[in-house]
């Protein structure tokens, strides 16, 4: 199973670039998780076309969207317990640990964003992934895939997304 994890898109609506990113990197994933800061309802609606889409509010979401989305979500996925939250504060060094502590025990994977910095670490038996920022402007856009092995083992694949991306579909 492949989980696509994205965050910090900072776009209110889907641009042609984001549509190409979706076609190339996201639509073929078994699950799509957005860890907040979509900023607009039009982009949220666009991502809702994915059959297994989970999203949380971020600190930069417009008011109406932040009212629609939860601050955190938890769900079961093939025997795994998964959580997602945006994140908070400015201390990148300890944020992933604070995120795990905020969910409590019993999680296999927690996805978060906010820092715009990719991370893959483990705290108290819980894998934690931050995909970085899938923002068209600024630093290199990034996302993460978390691959779930048949035995439940988790591995992360970090992906840097080119700014110039065509509409050619990648192999699923």
Image: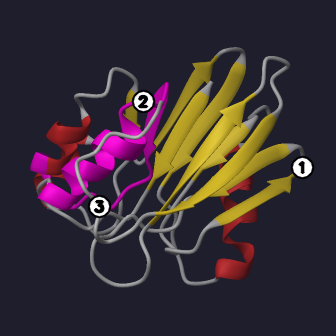
Helix, strand or loop under label 1: loop
Q: Residue furthest right?
A: 124
Q: Which residue is at a point 64% across and 83% down the rendered structure image?
A: 91
- Relative height, residue 150 to residue 160 (above, below): above
Residue 103 shows up from this direction = yes
The residue under label 1 is: 124
* Discs 1/3, front: 3
Marking on residue 165: 3
Q: Earlier in the sequence, mark 2 or mark 3?
A: 2
Q: CA distance from mark 2 to mark 3?
A: 17 Å
Residue 24 inside the magenta-drawn segment:
yes
Q: Earlier in the sequence, mark 1 or mark 3?
A: 1
Q: Can you give x and y, in whole percent of width and height, for residue 144 in the image?
A: 56, 52
Q: Can you give x and y, in whole percent of width and height, for residue 30 in the image?
A: 49, 24
Helix, strand or loop under label 3: loop
- Is 159 left, or right, of 65 in this rendering? right
Q: Which residues are magenta?
A: 16-42
Q: Nearer the viewer, residue 155 or 56?
A: 155
- Is 69 left, or right, of 104 in this rendering? left
- Relative height, residue 52 to residue 5 (above, below): above
Q: Which residue is at a point 40% across and 34% down the rendered structure image?
A: 54
Residue 154 inside the magenta-drawn segment:
no
- Is 170 left, or right, of 22 in this rendering? right
- Relative height, residue 42 to residue 59 (above, below): above
The residue under label 2 is: 28
Q: Can you give x and y, in whole percent of width and height, for residue 85 in the image?
A: 50, 51
- Is 160 left, or right, of 93 in this rendering? left
């Amino acid at each position: 199973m492949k989980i696509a994890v994205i965050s910090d898109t900072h776009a209110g609506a889907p641009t042609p670039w984001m549509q190409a990113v979706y076609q190339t990197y996201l639509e073929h994933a078994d699950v799509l998780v957005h860890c907040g800061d979509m900023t607009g309802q039009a982009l949220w609606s666009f991502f809702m076309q994915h059959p297994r889409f989970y999203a949380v509010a971020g600190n930069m979401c417009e008011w109406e969207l932040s009212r629609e989305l939860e601050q955190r979500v938890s769900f079961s996925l093939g025997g795994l317990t998964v959580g997602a939250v945006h994140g908070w504060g400015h201390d990148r060094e300890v944020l992933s640990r604070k995120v795990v502590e905020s969910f409590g025990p019993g999680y296999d994977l927690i996805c978060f964003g906010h820092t715009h910095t990719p991370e893959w670490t483990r705290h108290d038996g819980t894998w934690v992934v931050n995909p970085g920022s899938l923002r068209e402007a600024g630093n290199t856009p990034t996302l993460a895939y978390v691959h779930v092995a048949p035995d439940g083992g988790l591995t992360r694949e970090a992906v840097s997304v080119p700014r110039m991306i065509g509409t050619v579909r990648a192999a699923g």
